[in-house]
Structure formats: structure tokens, C-alpha cells
Amino acid sequence: MSTTEKPFETEAAAAAAGFTTHHGEHDHGAGTGLIKTSYDPRLTNEDLAPLKEQSWSWYNIFAFWMSDVHGVGGYVFAGSLFALGLTSWQVLIALLVGITVVNLLCNLIAKPSQLNGVPYPVACRSTFGVLGANVPAVIRGLIAVAWYGIQTYLASSALVIVVLKFFPQMLPYADVHHHGFMGLSTVGWAGFMLLWVLQAFVFWNGMETIKKFIDFAGPAVYIVMFILAGYMVWRAGWRNIGINLGGVKYHGMEVVPVMITAISLVVSYFSGPMLNFGDFSRYGKSFRSVKRGNFWGLPVNFLAFSLVTVITTAATLPVFGQLITDPVETVGRIDYPMAVVLGALTFTIATIGINIVANFVSPAFDFSNVAPRLISWRAGGMLAAVASIFITPWNLFNNPAVIHYTLDVLGSFIGPLYGVLIVDFYLVKRQKIELHDLYSMSEKGAYWYRNGVNYTAVMALLPAAAIAVACVLVPGMNGMANFSWFIGALLGAVFYRALARK
């Protein structure tokens, strides 16, 4: 099967071509894979094999992005851009330009996985070698673990607000100084572990359940967000809502570099899900449906969500006397108990959605790729989930500078990976991938390179990542920190193109 062939319509047709499908517990995991008898078991399991059926419509991709955007983190991030000193309309323009760039980049990275029905780490084998692909897989997997923990903590915080609203007698147990362990209160631990278990349950039931969950979660948050925005506008009065929320104002061309910074931060914010978007585009019926889903899910959806966020954030100033960028805190201050419950539960559901799609599915494939015979898709996901507890994500998140700092460091690693992968697929491979060789340990295989590793890709990646990290960590270079993703991606692309020509 080449890059232009479609999955087999019947099992008989697949069998005639030398493929086998396995039925059993894995049928409800990452999807049923087609395994050719020649595939090496050290590189293959049913979760990593090319899909037997690609069934996701454009709406499923659209719902994926809704789930990814409509979380507490997305709301807080959009609100945090006001700290740069931009007015509301400037923030909106920056968000729109940034998300349009993300849309374009997602379309580029989606293609190899959609055409071949393979997840991100398998697609990486064509660039980094069948064994070298573990480098980008592990990097992305570890990043997902950190964010999985942070997002679970955010969702549990919304849940804790509801509990304390109705059971104020629990307040003493919410005091981390008297009833706390490792920096989190007893109530906080209860909320965190409850969310942890709920997410694990949804994930364990497989991609079909995840698809149904995100199809519901994304639109549900919209409804609540519009209700919350309407309520806040009604409380504040439309005339009392100011549009200039930033603390600093810029005049004329002074605003341009600040807006460019905001655009860069938008790209960095989505850099993780963007890099491994192949884990989801592989399920798309066609590349056209993936592009359509991306358009509605990114520029259109993100702009609508941002508008609601800006209006709601702006209304907090006249209503509560201070600017509140956290929707959970906004909901918690509403006088109607049922409204608090509805709002907090919705944001909890939304954060479960974003966490599963962005930070659960990805490491599941990534860690499975490292040892396919030992680690299934389910086992890889659970490994990531357990690891997320031990990093104590609340301690990470409670650092005021952690969100933007984390974005910068993420970009440092992810940018170069993206640059190398795109240049290899479009300029070096000319969009041609030998599907069967992705699962071959033969020295004659197209992606064996040298000892299973394409050292050219590794040599391009390492200096690009080192320079991007330096932009973040070296004091004299921190002016470029917000642009680390773009710097890393450009350098990774240039280095790889130069080395690949030799």
C-alpha cells in the first residue's frame, strides 16, 4: 500500500494482500490495525499498524479542536494576553492571526498520517529511522505527561469549588497547611484522584468512546460559556464593559512587536497537539475532511471562543471590581448555587476532554512505539497517567510565571522536531512514504538508514533544540524566548535541508 492507496474495504481483500486483522480486546483500543505478515513484531502491534478503517468525518476533527480549545487553560491563556498590555481588539487580531498559522501548520503535519493511517511516532520513522523515531516519541510523550498532570489539577480545582460551595464544613480540609500532603490539600487530593480515575475510564474504553466524548464535550462548553457571558453582560450593563483591559497602552507602531509576541505565544500554546496531530488525522476519512475540520475547529471556533472569553473577562471588572481571567473563579463568585454547579461541572468536563485528546492519546502511542511487544496503546496511556501524579503538577502550576515559561520551553523542543519532519516529508521525500518499510527491521528497508537511525535528522535536531532552549534559559537571550518555537522550527528545517543534501 503506497501513500495513494486506500485502506482495504473487506477483510478478504486485506488477507489477499498479505494483511491480517486481529480480533479481541484490542478492537476497542486505538482501532483495528492491518498487520502484514512481513511486519517485524519489534515495530508492530495492532495499535501502531495502519488502520483497517478511517471513519472520522470533518465534524469529529472539529469536535477534537473544540475539546482542545474549550478548557480552563485555553480561557486563562486568552485572558493572560491582556497582561502584555494589548487592548481587546488587538488581542483578538493576534489570536486570529496566530490560530490561522496553527491551522496551516496542522494541515501540513496531518498529511503523512492521514494518507497512511498511521500515528505520529510511526510517521516519524520515515524521518528519524525505524528505531530513531523513539527520540521524537519520547520527547512528545514526556511533555504530555507534564501537561496531563497540570490539566487534571485545573479540572479538579473546578470540582473543589463546587464541593466547598455546598459543603462549607469541608473548608478546613481544603487548607494545605493543616490538611495537606506534598503541597496539595486533602480535598484537593480527593478532587485530583477522582478526575484522574474518570479520565482513565474514558481512555480505557478506546478511541471510539473518546470520539463520542469529545463530540459531546466541545459543544457543551460553548452553551455554558454563552450563558456565562450573557449573565455577566446583564450584571455589568453593556455600557460599563470596557474594551481596554491591558495595563499598558501602546501607540502607533509600538504595538506591532507586542502583537507579534502574542501571535507567537498562540502557536506555542498549540505546539504540542499540533506536533502529534497525526495521532488523530490518521482516523480522517480523507485529507479534505481533515482540512475542513481544522478550518472550523481552529480559526472559526477559536475566534468565537476568544470573543466570548474577552467579553466575559471584561465584564468581571465592573461586576466584581477586579479583572478575573480564570473562568472557574468567575463561576465561583456567582450568587446562584445551581449556576456554580453547572459552570464548574462543564469546565470539568471540558478539561477532561482537552486532557484526553492532547495529553492521553499522544503518550499512549509514543510509549507504545518504544516497545510495541510490551506496551500496548492502553498501557502507554496508563504509564503516562501514573507518571503525572508523581510530578506534583499543582506545584508546577502555582508558580505565577509557569504558563508562559512552560510554553517557551515546550516550543524549544517541539519546534525543531516540527521543522525536521516537515522538510523531510515535503522536500526530501516529496510526499512519498513506503508504508511497509515503516515496520521493517531489514537493512534493505527504506527507513533503516544506519542501525535503524537517521543520524542526519538527529544532527539537525540537537543544535536547533539547543539554540531554542538557550533562547529561553540564557538571561541575555530571553528577549527571544517567546519566539523559541519559530526559531527552533526554522533552524531544524534549515539544518536538516542542508545536511540531507550532502
Image (cartoon, rainbow, N blue to C red):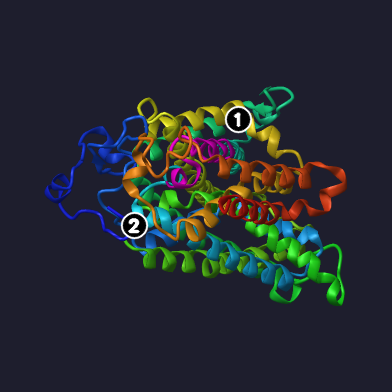
Question: Residue 102: which quarter of the image?
Answer: bottom right
Crowding at mark 2 (Cα within 10 Å: few <14, some 14-19, many 20+): some
Up-down relation of residue 339 to residue 375 (above or below): below
Numbered disc 2: secondary structure: loop
Q: Nearer the observer, disc 1 or disc 2?
A: 2
Q: For residue 187, which numbered disc appears in the image?
A: 1
Up-down relation of residue 113 to residue 304 (above or below): above
Q: Nearer the viewer, residue 375 or 152?
A: 375
Residue at image location 34% in from the left, 37% down from the top: 440
Q: Nearer the viewer, residue 368 or 391?
A: 368
Q: Is residue 129 magenta?
A: yes
Residue at image location 39% in from the left, 45% down from the top: 446
Up-down relation of residue 293 to residue 203 (above or below): below
Q: Alpha carbon of mark 1 to alpha carbon of mark 2: how far?
A: 52 Å
x and y percent of residue 159 in the render?
Answer: 56, 41
Task: Let me know if residue 171 appears in the view.
Answer: yes
Q: Going by the image, does 470 lie left or right of 66?
A: right
Kind of residue at badge 1: Val
Q: Going by the image, does 56 lie left or right of 489?
A: left
Q: Is residue 117 magenta?
A: no
Please, what is the dominant secondary structure of the magenta stretch? helix
Kind of residue at badge 2: Thr
Q: Which residue is mark 2?
A: 3
x and y percent of residue 61 in the render?
Answer: 42, 59
Crowding at mark 1 (Cα within 10 Å: few <14, some 14-19, many 20+): many
The reply to whether dot 1 and dot 2 touch (C-beta < 8 Å) is no
